[in-house]
Image (spheres, grey):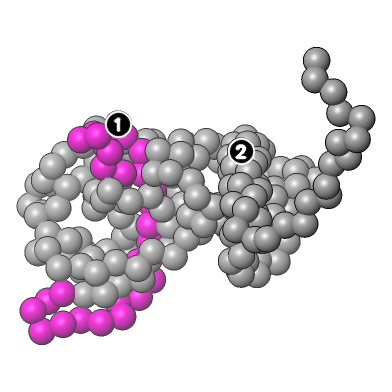
Amino acid sequence: MFPLQSIFFPGETVPLHIFEPRYRQLINDCREEALTFGIPVFKDKTIEYGTEVQLVEVVNTYEGGEMDVICIARQVFRVLDFENRMPGKLYAGAVVSFLEADNDADEGLRKQVLKRIKVLYDLMAVEMPQVPFDKFNSYAFAHKMGLSFEQEYELLQLTNETERLHYIDDHLQSTIAVLEQINTTKAVIEMNGHFKNFDPLDFEDFTLN
């Protein structure tokens, strides 16, 4: 186990800088024995859910033993029992249960969510990364649509792709509404700084009540 205050979603590339002796030992063990390891999310001083990751490459090894490594995130798990230090090891271990994943979702829903993401990026005037539709899923933009840490953690725990897409769609709808209101307010503020041509009122038939 390699607890972090970070969330990683299945399929995500995970770059890590390893410097503590316990995690250097962990990476070396994974390298030598082709093991995977877990990154449980350390949140509110507790550990409950996390993601299994697989070591792909040790990119750099420094004189002091530090390493830069690339991993790939795989399955989401729930921690059943945590051991702060495994016997004979410097690092922690745990008994986990992998969450069953249902990754099928309606094509129409996927298109709807992808379209809303495009609207979000247009409103923010940010270039949207190109993701082929057949590669698009609920995790593709999980870190790139303004979800809070708590929201990302909730998303991590959802096992059904349709449920995840609806969760994201709800977030996108509310975020887009806020941004549209901000842009409207911005336009009004900018307009108030310009000279305006007001049509004069006709007072000929004006009377006091």
Q: Position of residue 194 (x, y in %)?
A: 65, 61
Question: In the picture provided, is 200 more to the left or to the right than 170?
Answer: right
Given residues 180 and 147, the one toward you in this image is 180
| Label 2–label 1 contact, CB within 8 A | no
The magenta segment is 41-66
Residue type, numbered disc 1: Leu
- Secondary structure at badge 2 equals helix
Q: Quadrant of residue 89?
A: bottom left
- Secondary structure at badge 1 equals strand
Crowd around label 2: few <14 · some 14–19 · many ≥20 (10 Å): few
Residue ID at (59%, 66%) = 126
Q: Is residue 57 magenta?
A: yes
Residue 116 visible in the displayed image: yes
Question: In the picture provided, is 117 more to the left or to the right than 13?
Answer: right
Residue 136 visible in the displayed image: no
Q: How many marks?
A: 2
Q: Position of residue 84 (x, y in %)?
A: 13, 42
Question: In the picture provided, is 133 more to the left or to the right than 158?
Answer: right
Q: Quadrant of residue 64?
A: bottom left
Question: In the picture provided, is 203 more to the left or to the right than 21?
Answer: right
Given residues 89 and 196, the one toward you in this image is 196
Task: Tell me the tag on residue 174.
Answer: 2
The numbered mark, 2 or 1, whose residue comes first in the sequence reads 1
Magenta stretch: dominant SS? strand
For the C terminus, the image quarter is top right
Q: CA distance from mark 2 to mark 1?
A: 35 Å
Crowd around label 1: few <14 · some 14–19 · many ≥20 (10 Å): few
Given residues 120 and 89, the one toward you in this image is 120
Residue ID at (83%, 49%) = 199
Q: Which residue is mark 1?
A: 80
Residue ID at (14%, 53%) = 91
Residue type, numbered disc 2: Ser
